[in-house]
Image: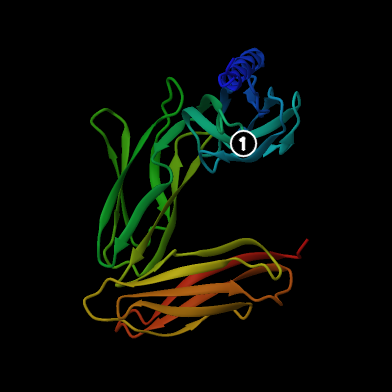
Amino acid sequence: MPRTHRPARVVARIGAALTLVLAAAPALVIAAPRLGVEKPVADFGSVEQGTPVTNVFSLKNTGDAVLHISQVKSSCGCTAAVVSESSVPPGGEARVLATLDTGRVVGRTTKVLSVYSDDPELPVAALTLTGEVLADLALSPNPVYLGRLRRGETTSREVVIRPGRPGGTAAIRSVGGDLAGLQARLELGPDGTQRLRLALDGNVPLGRFSRELRLETTSARQPVIVLPVFGSIEGDVVVLPSQLSFGVARMGASPERRLLIRNRGLQPLSVRRVTVPESFDYSLRVLQDGLEYQLSLRLRDDVAPGTISGDVEIYTDHPSEQRVVVPLHAVVRRRG
């Protein structure tokens, strides 16, 4: 008898057997971390303004691989967080200590902390602090940001002043402090609330604008409220960023930082020279002749550990903006 079909039958039987084995085998499972938050929202109730609020959040690794927490970010500068462990084994736990500074917070508030980890299903988890901060007076906005203004430009802002607790009757009775370049007028709004109208003069010099107003009140708890007012006045020569920080740098491994020098005027601009603190090296590159330049800075390898503060001075041929100053800051630590 012919045997030409036997190999085909054997192959068919082997294929069927493999199909049965694969069907019976369990699915392949890849080990992964899982971030679990026991109580993601903490309500601290009601506190007086200025009372520090703290809460400890519990983070658990419910997965079967090590959980790595890369960072915890807050939604505002008034909230800080410290994480106890950056690597959490399966079944382990880390704690996040959250602290809220209520010194400038009034009324119902909600602050969010974002936990970043390598959980593939939940790379960012939210932790929330919420509650009521009581004060005799609430100012909105506080502080007051005027923005980035061109030289000669004027602007105005309105601050609404309301009682910060039920049934409160406190009020602002006078405005003082550093009013150079500002006009301040206290008014009564149509709804019975006070309004502070602030107007910036058009003759304020170039650079960062920063003032602190002292508002005297009828409150025994808050006899004086300090209201910061800030912004920046820019001319034709704009340098971005307006402040330069190297953060914490290691000796011999400094990151490079760059400043962009832009000409917003009608005439071409040349950068004549640049001076930097002696701890830094720099290079100047022309991006668009007469319009845009790039200044790169790097810490020298032989810089000693410590804190460095100084100025980058940029000299141009602009008729009224020959010198632009950019504050610079760095903290140098030893390698290792």
Q: Nearer the viewer, residue 236 or 92?
A: 92
**Res 98 visible:** yes
Residue type, mark 1 in image: Ser
Indicate the position of residue 260 as horizontal and vertical percent values. 41, 69
Image quarter (top left, top right, bottom left or bottom right) of the C terminus: bottom right
**Res 39 visible:** no
Image quarter (top left, top right, bottom left or bottom right) of the N terminus: top right
Question: For this view, does 277 lie left or right of residue 187?
Answer: right
SS type, badge 1: strand
**Which quarter of the figure has residue 281?**
bottom right
Q: Residue at x 25, y 66 (%)?
A: 152
Indicate the position of residue 206 as horizontal and vertical percent values. 36, 69
Indicate the position of residue 71 as horizontal and vertical percent values. 62, 41
Q: Which residue is mark 1?
A: 117
Q: Is residue 210 above or below residue 171?
A: below
Please, which residue is most extreme toward the right here?
Answer: 336
**Which quarter of the figure has residue 46?**
top right
Q: Residue at x 46, y 80 (%)?
A: 284
Question: For this view, does 322 lie left or right of residue 44?
Answer: left
Indicate the position of residue 217 as horizontal and vertical percent values. 44, 39
Q: Nearer the viewer, residue 236 or 182?
A: 236
